[in-house]
Structures are given as C-alpha cells and as structure tokens.
Image: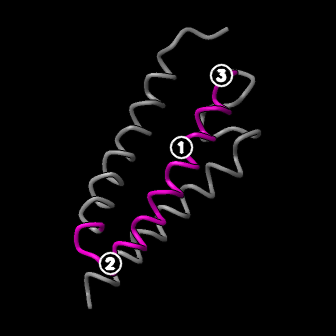
Amino acid sequence: MAITILMIIFALILFTLAGYLWFHRQTGFSLFTPQRYPNITGVITFWAIELTVVGVLALLGTVNIVIMVIALAVGSLSGMGLGLTLVTLMNAPRN
C-alpha cells in the first residue's frame, strides 16, 4: 500500500514539473529565455511531453511491479537527461 502511495506522489511530481515546463515554453525556464537561447522552446516542449508520458507510466505502475520498476528507471534517467540537456545548452555558444 505504501509503495502505491509513493508511486502516485512520484507521478504527481512528474506532472507538476511537466506542467511547469509546458507553461514556460515561451516565457523561458529559470535562466533560459527564448531571447538568449533560441532553441529552448523545442527543448522544453520535448521534456514536458516526455515527463508527462513517464508520469502516466508511473500511474500505470501502481498496478504492476514490472511497469513500476520501468517507470522509476525511466523517470530517474529523464531527470538526469533534463539536467544534462540544460547544462549542455548553457555551455553552447549563443547566437
């Protein structure tokens, strides 16, 4: 029962982050603005959709242990990928 609650919390965190990214596509995310980083809109859109899919997978993981493990692994790798993408973008030459 506790693991089901934790998976729902994990999914809610993913949905919150995805929603934040989705609604900040045009205004910018943290230090990243479309004026300074022209390709940030596409990057943020990709990660918002990807995190939403992982959130749905996490909700499906509440009924099946295999899906739960896959959702946790993909969710962890997605968070790392988002961070690495933003660091790479920060270090890229600006137009």
If you read the primary sequence from the N terminus, does the residue marked by circle 2 or circle 1 appear first?
A: 2
Residue 55 is one of the magenta-drawn residues: yes
Q: On screen, 89 above or below 23?
A: above
Horizontal side of residue 88 vs 26, given as left or right: left
Is 17 situated above or below 40?
A: below
> Can you identify the residue that label 1 sits on?
47
Q: Position of residue 39 (x, y in %)?
A: 65, 23
Query: Any mark on residue 38, and which?
Result: none
Q: Secondary structure at mark 1?
A: helix
Q: Position of residue 73 (x, y in %)?
A: 27, 54
Vertical comparison of 44 with 12: above or below? above
Q: How is the image coloured?
A: one colour
Q: Residues within 10 Å of mark 1 (few under 14, many from 20)?
A: many
Q: Please identify the quarter of the rendering in which residue 57 is found.
A: bottom left
The first of marks 3 and 1 along the sequence is: 3
What residue sits right under mark 3 in the picture? 37
Asked whether the beta carbons under mark 3 and mark 1 sit within 8 Å of each other, the answer is: no
Which of the pair 3/57 is nearer the observer?
A: 57
Q: Helix, strand, or loop for circle 3? A: loop
Where's residue 30, x and y in %?
60, 40
Question: Label 2 belongs to which residue?
Answer: 6
Q: Quadrant of the N terminus?
A: bottom left
